[in-house]
Image (cartoon, grey):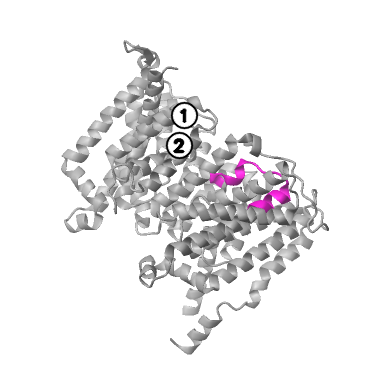
Amino acid sequence: MDLASILLGGLAAGMVLFVVSVGLSVTMGLMGFVNLAHGGFAMLGGYAVVLAMRHWGLPFSAALAFGFAAIAALSVLLERTLYARLYRASELDQVLFTIGLVFVMIASVTLAVGPESQRVELPAWLDGQTDLGFLRYRSYSLALIAAGTLLMLALWLGFERTRTGAKIRAAVDNRRMAESLGVDVGRLFTLTFALGSGLAAVGGGLGAEILGLDPQYPLRYLAYFLIVVAVGGLGRVTGVFCAALLIGVLDFTLKIYFPKGGTMFIYMLTLGFLLARPQGLFGKRGT
Amino acid sequence: MSSAAMHELAMRHRLQWWEALPWAAGLAAFFLFPNYLAFGTQVLVTILFALSLDLVLGYAGIVTLGHAAFFGAGAYAVGMLAAHAGWNEPLSGLVAAALVAGLLGLVSGWILLRTHGLTLLMLTLCTMALLEQAANMFSGWTGGFDGMPGLSFTPILGLFEFDVLYFRTQYLYALAALLLGFAVVRVLVYSPFGRSLTGIRENLLRMHAVGAPVRARQVLVYAISAALAGVAGAVFVQATGYVNLAVLGLERAAGVLIILILGGYGRLYGAFVGALVYMLLEHTLSKAYPTAWQLGLGLTLMLVALFARNGIFGLGDALRRRWSAR
């Protein structure tokens, strides 16, 4: 494979990582809640997309929208009834609760759908190759890169240019200060939690082609999502974007050149990076 | 402070009569269930592993997702020494495993414990994943994915041969290792060193303010705990005669965390109760109904995190308080 194709493949994988992880970064930044079940929402979203297409004959894009709505609604339900009780609990309780939730999600999907891995049927216009002039590449990967970039722009605008975005940024930087200025951080959190879980669901659907889709998905990619968030910095959309692309490209490239030890380098780089900058790429010191 | 309370505080490290019960039960199980000693050995190893985690998590308040790294380090140390260096003597193997895992704990603790919260969780997870990938990659030394089966060890003290069929020797060997490890942990947590760890867990800022060498103590307890976990891993390998990648995966790390929480952390005997209950349930349920087991485990964890924050022992305490309040 030549350099351009490797780069494009890595970027496509990175976009999937971004779409899944961005919500986790914002919710962790807002509440400091260690949500290890975030990948579970991505998996449930993937299943929602696959099942909606298979049983209701929805087209791919409509199924993605359905997955977003269904998982966002489910996450609000869980957030209001269960997560909300643990905001003031210790990290350990949060870790335990969300690991438990992951197990419940895995078991439920195994019982309801089965343990085998699922395939997403791509629409015909995404399934072929596109001629870019200098090389021909898979249309789906190119579409992923385009969609991820658009989403990044939309989120960036929402974060930097709207009032709600400003409130979120304020609450991430200093929650108590934001609260004393009258920002309802609880409601903000519910909103971002729903949006983040919905995006994770879309990422699960979009990424099923690259990451696969089976009940073990949330545990298999847990470390990746967490690495992206930790490297990107909590509550930083641009940071998560850069981290996701970086890790996507590095992972893709290293796995091609060193098929056996590729993942090892990712962990090594993450270790070194986090030790040098524990606050992430663009995080501020002391937050 | 009333004199009764002071007396209790001064005497809290004294051995209670009921502290002999687990060991009596352990010995009784040896005679009562001769066909289940292989399983019993696994339980004892897991108790030791959970106990080592209790030292860092329950007493020092360091939340780690990667404790299996040290279990695995001890396991691979013994396995590789036996397979490549012909070092099959079990007791010196335990010492070697404790040294290797302890050194790893000392170095990684010294580097990692300057962070906290999510970053520390991530770094411990990454360290473990790194070791797992390394064990997978250098398959010439570690056996890679398949691990190293068929390891053999010389008789303990030259007298007691490892018993491949019934695990009689292994069971008593693991029980002895657990007793030794338990003694170390018990002495540690009631020592001034252990009290200062509890202080660090409860109020980090104040411990800094009174001039306690916080980080040095955290690193030291991390290394001691790592050495104990390494011994647990080594006993596991010597008893079963094989080592593979499962000794340092996320599943083992999460499993031991769950066991400790279920039993109740920061109270020495939580590890015993948690390991026994968890492994009995797993042994009976997970093979026949793997999905139902996972579902039940997940629901239990959620309920424990929401309502029973101190595990089985904590529930007992709450009931006792309610009882005595009447």
Q: Quadrant of the N terminus of chain A?
A: top left
> Residue B197, how many percent across, how many down?
47, 67
Rendering quarter of residue B169:
bottom right
Q: Residues within 10 Å of mark 1 (few under 14, many from 20)?
A: some
In this view of the protein, can residue A70 be seen by the observer? no
The circle on residue A254 is 1
Query: Does dot 2 land on a helix, a strand or a loop?
Result: helix
| A143, B136: nearer the viewer | B136
> Residue A266, how many percent across, how many down?
45, 36
| B133, B314: nearer the viewer | B133
| B280, A248: nearer the viewer | A248
**Residue type beneath disc 2:** Ile
In this view of the protein, can residue B208 be seen by the observer? yes
Give the left or right position of residue B97, taking residue A201 as reference. Answer: right
Q: Give whichever of discs 2 and 1 has the lower sequence position.
A: 1
Where is A121 relative to B246, above or below?
above
The circle on residue A266 is 2
Q: Residue at x 64, y 74 (%)?
A: B18
Q: Which residues are magenta?
A: B233-251
Disc 1 sits on a residue from what chain?
A
Q: Main secondary structure of the magenta part?
A: helix
Disc 2 sits on a residue from what chain?
A
